[in-house]
Amino acid sequence: MKSVKASLMNLNFWCTLSVMDLGFITCQYYYFPYFAGFNMGILTFLNVSMPVQFWFGIACNYTVVIVIVLLFETRSSLIQQNRFRIKTTIGRISWVLVNFCAIMAAQTPMYFDIPDQMDAKMFILKSLPCPTIEFFTEPLFVMTIDPFWENYIHISGNITFLCLTLQILFFTSCCIYYLFISKTMSRVSQSTRRLQIRSFYLMIIQTVFPIILIFVPLSALMNKEKDEGGHQSENNFSMIMISVHHGATSLAILLVHHPYRNFLKTKIFCGKETKVVTVTTDVSFRS
């Protein structure tokens, strides 16, 4: 079960890093539905350019999703009878790198066609006549105002999430087939099978719960039209919900996985994991 603990800790780490990015490292402030905003975090204090900060924020959030997919892959690969399981660590790392590099490569082209910032701000002001004062006082960065690149960002984002969702469905299907349908599992002890099924259910609960929290506000945000005007309170609420999602993911991990809670306690408080050792002896009797 070490691989499961490692996957859960990995997800916990990236959720925490993403929350720190939103609230401390970059502290993003956006003017949705435009691809424009500014950052007020530690990276701005260190004079890191806005494009680099935007790219870092995108990378953090997509990595969280990739790690969620990795959790399903790990659960699927733990089933020894699964012919589709990834058997080696090198294979798993390669699969993660392919996903990450492909996603970030798709998110990079618009950086080579950044518009003139003053013209872009004036364009935004035509439909957003009364933005917050920070629009004029902070170093606002506009990613694009070109309809082509805006459509490209939406389409590439949808394709990316579709590909990651299909991977989750594939690994989930493998788990369902081998845990509930396949006859090859008859060779596995009932206690081991029950443990795998329970772990699979807990993983589903842990994943679905945070998604429900974020689905409604983000759906409303993505369907918002530009001619409706800007409502910064809605934008702020949406950013808060993204942070809540990552926090809820970490909380769900701690709530549903009792062995993982104990594992963290041993690491945080420098305790030792309890190991049960069974000793058997052969005893013979002579009459």
Image (cartoon, rainbow, N blue to C red):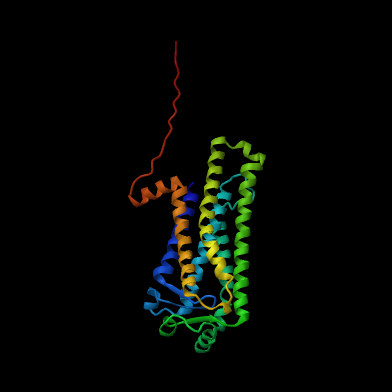
For the question of whether residue 152 can be seen, the reply is: yes
- The residue that appears at 59% across and 37% down in the rendered structure is 188
Nearer the observer, 46 or 218: 218
Nearer the observer, 62 or 123: 123
Pinpoint residue 168: horizontal percent, then vertical percent: 60, 56
Q: Is residue 258 above or below residue 49?
A: above
Pinpoint residue 4: horizontal percent, then vertical percent: 50, 50
- The residue that appears at 47% across and 77% down in the rendered structure is 52
Pinpoint residue 193: horizontal percent, then vertical percent: 57, 39
- The residue that appears at 35% across and 52% down in the rendered structure is 268
Pinpoint residue 147: horizontal percent, then vertical percent: 62, 81
For the question of whether residue 14 can be seen, the reply is: no
- Left of 155 or right of it: where is 124? left
- Left of 27 or right of it: where is 98? right
- The residue that appears at 52% across and 75% down in the rendered structure is 32
Nearer the observer, 121 or 4: 121
- Number of marks in the image? 0
Q: Is residue 116 above or below residue 169?
A: below
Q: Is residue 121 above or below residue 76?
A: below
Say which quadrant the C terminus sits in: top left
